Amino acid sequence: MRAAYRVAQVKAAEAMLMPELPPGTLMMRAAYALARRCALILGRVYGSRVVLLVGSGDNGGDALYAGAFLAGRGAAVSARLTDPGRVHAEGLSTFLSSGGRIFDGYPSNADLIVDGLVGIGASGPLRGTALSFLEDLPSAPIVAVDIPSGVEVDTGDVPGPAVRADVTVTFGCLKPALVVGPAVAHAGQVELVDIGLRPYLRGGAALYVADADDVAAWWPRPDLDSDKYTRGVVGLATGSVAYPGAALLSVAGAVAGPTGLVRYAGGAHELVVARHPNVVVAPRVAEASRVQAWVCGSGLGTDTQAAAELRAVLGSPVPAVLDADALTLLVDGSMAGDLRRRDAPVVLTPHDREFARLAGESPGADRVAAALKLAAWTNSTVLLKGYRTVIASPSGEAWVNTTGTPDLATGGTGDVLGGLLGSLLAAGLAPLRAAVMATYVHGQAARHSAETGPVTAVEVAEALRPAIAATVKAVGRR
C-alpha cells in the first residue's frame, strides 16, 4: 500500500531530517532525481532546449539545480524567475555557472518545461507573475516539481488556473493532491522519489492507496474444508418489478465475489433465478433465509414496501451495504433510530448528489474531509463515489481508489459495485477493507471493458471475473 501525507507532516519530517545531513543534501537529492526524469523524457539531452519556471521557494531551487545538471550534459537551459530578488541564491549561482541563462520571455521553441513555480507551502490560486507565466506556455511536455503549481496540496482542489503537468516528480512521499480530487488530472504520471524522508513521517497518513499486491493478499480463498456456507452467504434486497435491471446487475456483482451462496429477495426474483439459477430467491427479505451480509437499495423504489424492506435489512444483525434508493429513504430521518440501534456495520455508498441529500451539503473542495465527517456522523463506512472514490471509516481512516475511470459514470455500474461489496462483507472482510477491495477490482473491470469500446454496466459485470483473476490469481500466487 501507499500513503499520502499532509503538508504539515512533510514539513515536520524535513525539519527532523535536515539537521542530520550536510547542508543542501535534501535539495540535491531531489534535484538529481528531477534531472534524471527530465533526461529520460528528453531522450537525447545534448542540444535539447529546456525551460525552467522558477518561483521563490525550494521548488524553484530544485528546478535550478536540476537545470544545472541538464546544462552540464549539454542542454540549452533557460529560466524564467517570478521574483529575481527572492530566488534561491545558491541554486541560481550553480545554474548560471553551469551555463544556464535567464530569460524574460519564452524561447522560440522548447523540448521540455520544468514547473518549479510554487511548492507544497503555497495555498490558494496562482497569482501575479506566476499566473502570467501560464498564459503563453510553449507546447512541450511539462514536468512538475513535487506538485503541479496551483493545486491545493492537502485537499486536491484546484481553485483557479494551474499547471497541467505530463509528469510530476514528487519527493519523500505522496501528497493528497496527487491521488484525489481534480488536482489528479493536473499531475499526470506521478513518480515518487525516495529522499530519506519516510522514517521521519509522524502520525497517520491523510490517505492510503491500495495496490494489486494488497488486494491479492486480502482476497478470501476457499480451503479444503470450505463449503458454500462457510465461504459466506450474501443477501440482496435490490431491484423491483419497475426496476428489474438493478436486481440483475447487483446479483451479477455478487456472484463474481468470493461468497459461496447468493440469496436474492425482491420483486424481480423470477427474472433473477431465470438468469442466475445458482441464486436462491424469495419475494421479500422476511422470507429469505439467513445471510452474513445484506445489500439494499439499488432499484428498490421509495414506496412503503421499499421502506419495509429497508427496515427489515436494518433490523438484521449482519453488515449492510446501503445504496441508491436506500439512501433516499434515509434522508427524511424516519429511519434514524433503526440506523442508530444497529450493532452490525453499515456501508453507505453515495455519489455526490446522494451525499448532499444525506449530509445537507455537497462534498465541496475537500472530499476526504467530507467523507470522514459523514462517516463519523452516521457511524458508518462511507464510500463516496467519483473518479477517485474515497472510502472513509468512522474511526478517521481514509483510502482512495486510483483504478477508477470516467467510463464508470454510466447507469448501473454502482449496482454491480454494491453486489460485489456485499459479497466481500459476507465473506468476512471488515467494511473498510471490503470497500477498498471492491472499488479496486470494479475499477479494473471498467478499464478492461473500455479496451473494446464504450462501457456499460453489463460489460463491467462481465469483466469482473477476469479483473479479479488478473489481480488476485496472477499477483497473489506468484
Image: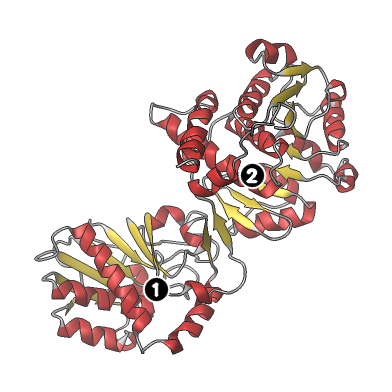
Q: Few, some or many C-alpha atoms within 10 Å of disc 1 (few <14, some 14-19, many ≥20)? A: some
The residue to which callout 2 is attached is 435
Q: Residue at x 53, y 38 (%)?
A: 441
Q: Few, some or many C-alpha atoms within 10 Å of disc 2 (few <14, some 14-19, many ≥20)? A: many
Q: Secondary structure at mark 1?
A: loop
Q: Position of residue 67 (x, y in %)?
A: 22, 74
Q: Is residue 271 left or right of residue 476?
A: right
Instruction: Name the amino acid type tagged 2.
Output: Ala
Q: Residue at x 66, y 59 (%)?
A: 397
**Looking at the rendered structure, which numbered label has been put on residue 372?**
none
Is residue 402 shown to the viewer in this render? no
The mark total stands at 2
**Could you say which quadrant of the image residue 232 lies in?**
top right
Q: Is residue 302 left or right of residue 8?
A: right
Q: Is residue 264 left or right of residue 435?
A: right
Q: Gap between marks 1 and 2, in whole Å?
A: 32 Å
Q: Position of residue 187 (x, y in %)?
A: 40, 57
**Could you say which quadrant of the image residue 105 lies in?**
bottom left
Q: Position of residue 3 (x, y in %)?
A: 53, 61
Is residue 399 shown to the viewer in this render? yes
Nearer to the camera, 206 or 304: 206
Q: Contact (CB < 8 A) between labels 1 and 2? A: no
Q: Is residue 155 left or right of residue 450?
A: right
Q: Is residue 419 above or below residue 377?
A: above
Nearer to the camera, 364 or 467: 467
Instruction: Name the amino acid type tagged 1.
Output: Ile
Q: Residue at x 52, y 45 (%)?
A: 387
The residue to which callout 1 is attached is 195
**Could you say which quadrant of the image residue 106 lies in?**
bottom left
Q: Quadrant of the C terminus?
A: top left
